Amino acid sequence: MKRVERTVDLVWDHIRDIRELVMEELQSMPEEVQTAAAMTSSELLENAVKYADDRPPRHGTFTLEHSDDILRIEISNLFAGKEAIRDLSEQIDRISAAEDKGELYVQRLTEIAMMDGESIGGRLGLYRIAFEGNFDLELTSSNDVVTVIATRRAA
Amino acid sequence: MSTETFEHEGLLIRVTDDAGKVTIRCEGTSDARDPHKFLGITLKKLVERTKDKSMTVDLSALRYMNSASVAPLINLMKDLHASGVPAVFLWNTQVSWQRTNFMCMKTLAKTFNGIAVEAIA
């Protein structure tokens, strides 16, 4: 298993760097796997930035592990309180329980389409990771430090 | 034929108006924290001046798009539908992430009369 670990500043502009790192690291893999891993890393980091505690240190740990069989992406950082953790955990539970991830994704798009207002975000990232990226998601937390792990078969 | 371009943080929007047929072509990367600020507002303004015309929204040259960028595209569909502007959205189904967006948007578009989602292979 090959492992790449980075301490990342939880700043929006740095997310693009991690996407590029993942694409480069997985360049021997099929395009679908590379882009799925880059998208998943990016969406998880976006969540980390959005939910991060304002107290320093505002950084997290990004880990990519891969072999011929398995791809594992992990983001760990300090969250801004229990409510944000519970919210994320409930989303992951809902996604994990769904038998048809594609149907769940389209259902979420339909919900977004029915919302009023222009600045709606959609909170679509985890749904996308499960459906488009084909990753399984898992969350653990301890003392407000949240670790989100995404795993899928590499082949 | 008139051509205009809008650019922000790696996302380029090229707009051509050729005898009443408006084409919006998005290129590059859409990964803003709040895509409404540029992508959403730009698309909304373009719809407002596209009355009595038809529109093609070509997304096939996008290299990457974050999930937050999906909402402005859905809002675009809604606005075009509400304005009675017939439109077609184009995705590149040779690219895996675009293929899944194509499939999902095609399903969603069934609820909007006059809006079609098609593949560029």
Image (cartoon, rainbow, N blue to C red):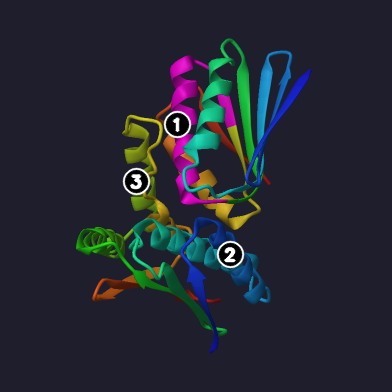
Query: Which labelled disc corresponds to residue A108?
Result: 3
Residue A57, visible in the rendered structure: yes
**Mark 2 burial class by Cα count in 10 Å: few <14, some 14-19, many 20+:** many
Q: Nearer the viewer, residue A82 or A93?
A: A82
Q: Is the residue A5 above or below the residue B92 in the image?
A: below
**Mark 1 burial class by Cα count in 10 Å: few <14, some 14-19, many 20+:** many
Which residue is depicted at the point 20% across and 64% down? A82
- x then y, percent, for residue B69: 50, 44
Distance from disc 1 to disc 3, alpha carbons, whole Å, reads 14 Å
Residue A149, visible in the rendered structure: no
Q: Earlier in the sequence, mark 2 or mark 3?
A: 2
Q: Dot 2 lies on which element?
A: helix
Q: Amino acid at mark 3?
A: Arg
Q: Is residue B19 magenta?
A: no
- x then y, percent, for residue B64: 60, 52
Is B15 left or right of B73, judged from the image as shown?
right
Name the residue that disc number 1 marks: B75
**Mark 3 burial class by Cα count in 10 Å: few <14, some 14-19, many 20+:** some
Q: What is the residue that sits farthest to the right in this orientation? A: B1
Name the residue that disc number 2 marks: A19
